[in-house]
Amino acid sequence: MRKIIILSAATLILSSCGIYNKYKPVSEVPEGLYGSESVAATDTANFGNLSWREVFTDPYLQNLVDSALLRNTDMQTAHLRVKEAEATLLTSKLSYLPSLFLAPEGAVSSFDRGKATQTYSLPVTASWELDIFGKVTTAKRRAKAAYEQSKEYEQAVKTQLVASVANTYYTLLMLDSQYEIAVATEAAWKESVNATRAMKKAGMVNEAGLAQTEATYFNICTTVLDLKEQINQAENSLALLLAETPHKIQRGKLGNQQLPENFSVGVPLQMLANRPDVRSAEFSLAQAFYTTNAARAAFYPSITLSGSAGWTNSAGSMIVNPGKFLASAVASLTQPLFNKGANIAQLKIAKAQQEEARLSFEQTLLNAGVEVNEALVQYQTAREKADYYNKQVASLQTAAKSTSLLMKHGNTTYLEVLTAQQTLLNAQLSQVANRFTEIQGVITLYQALGGGRM
């Protein structure tokens, strides 16, 4: 009874020292994390919970994402890290069990050319460290946190990869659309150059007007070539994400793309359940917590039970045949007394690293809020701009047609025609770029909310 009381008291003391304490997940986040009153705070399934196939419905894009998830080298490396952490966790789980070894031994000896004697032993040895002071438990919990952290890192890589493929794909569609506009404008300007040359022969336009028209045409030709080069670069970037050599990318049209328009981003705690970088940072904090526990446990003794059992014919100076069964058991206790301050230093280091992990986790939370806020503002701004761009392009198309007709009848100057058509081209290119910005806002918001799951 007395031994039980002593053992119970020791357990309570150790618990108060924090050796057996488990890490408690964060249950509170900063108020106003998203920094926007327009963000919906609802407990229903949010945008980040959708699978990437529900968000990106373009079949060409879906095939590209599938290929990237299968072949991308960063994705494969992240998966291997999970395997490594899983192996470490398995080792930690088995640390509770004793170590067993078979150590057979045989010898032949002869003294002064006398008759040779043969001895043998066939023992099984065992060693078992008692987890009274939580050293094994802490190591297992730390390995578990490392394993979970590696899985979240893999998910973070996946989320980033899905977003990168989608961004590059839609960049390609934007460039395609701008290229089509530029090529059509180039053809129209070529006709304008021919018409201006005819008008010059008729005395309706001077040499300066013709030169200005030709210069604008040549400028548009360089724009077409620039866009063609950018398309090639975007295709190469996409091939790189797929871990493939440069090749032509099969794709759809920007005007046919349908993405979600109404978003419910959820409350901050729900976002925590999605974002892999936040979860990864918290598991890193848990690892640091258990590292501190391990540093505390280093001040307490290690108790080890060891023993061996087996058959042997060696009995000291005598040889016994047949052999006899021999067994032994040993208990040992190792209590640190003076280790040149190493244990104290390790505890201080562990506490400092735990504080660093806590600060890193808090910063990750703040970054998450900023990313969601910026993505929402980017999308909402692009949506509002789209209406103005549509009206601007429609007005400029009317203006360009009107000035062209007026010039044919000599009622306006070539400069007004050049200005109207150049302004129309710039507005059309900006309209396409704004559509891409709107799509990019959806992608960024999806990534910021931890999307990317199947």
Image: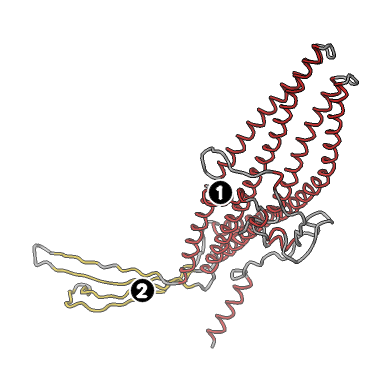
Closest to the camera, between mark 1 and mark 2, is: 1
| Residue 307 tag number | 2
* Residue 28 percent coordinates (x, y): 74, 64
The local secondary structure at tag 2 comes to strand
Q: In the rendered structure, which amino acid carries the disc numbered 2?
A: Gly
Q: Label 2 near label 1: C-beta < 8 Å?
A: no
Q: Is residue 319 left or right of residue 220?
A: left
| Quadrant in which the C terminus is drawn | bottom right
Q: In the rendered structure, which amino acid carries the disc numbered 1?
A: Ala
User: Which residue lies at the image location 44% right of the left edge and 72% below the top edge?
Assistant: 97
User: Which residue lies at the image location 57% right of the left edge and 84% below the top edge?
Assistant: 5
| Quadrant in which the N terminus is drawn | bottom right
Name the residue at the right extreme.
411
Q: Is residue 243 left or right of residue 391?
A: left
| Camera-nearest residue between 162 and 23 | 162
Residue 333's place in the image compared with 216, above or below, is below
Q: In this view, does 378 lie to the left or right of 278?
A: right
Mark 1 closeness class: few <14, some 14–19, many ≥20 residues within 10 Å: many
* Residue 216 percent coordinates (x, y): 76, 22
Q: Is residue 111 left or right of residue 300?
A: left
User: Which residue lies at the image location 88% right of the left edge and 21% below the top edge?
Assistant: 409
Instruction: Write down the residue under mark 1.
Output: 68
- Which mark sits nearer the N-terminus, 1 or 2? 1
| Camera-nearest residue between 253 and 348 | 253
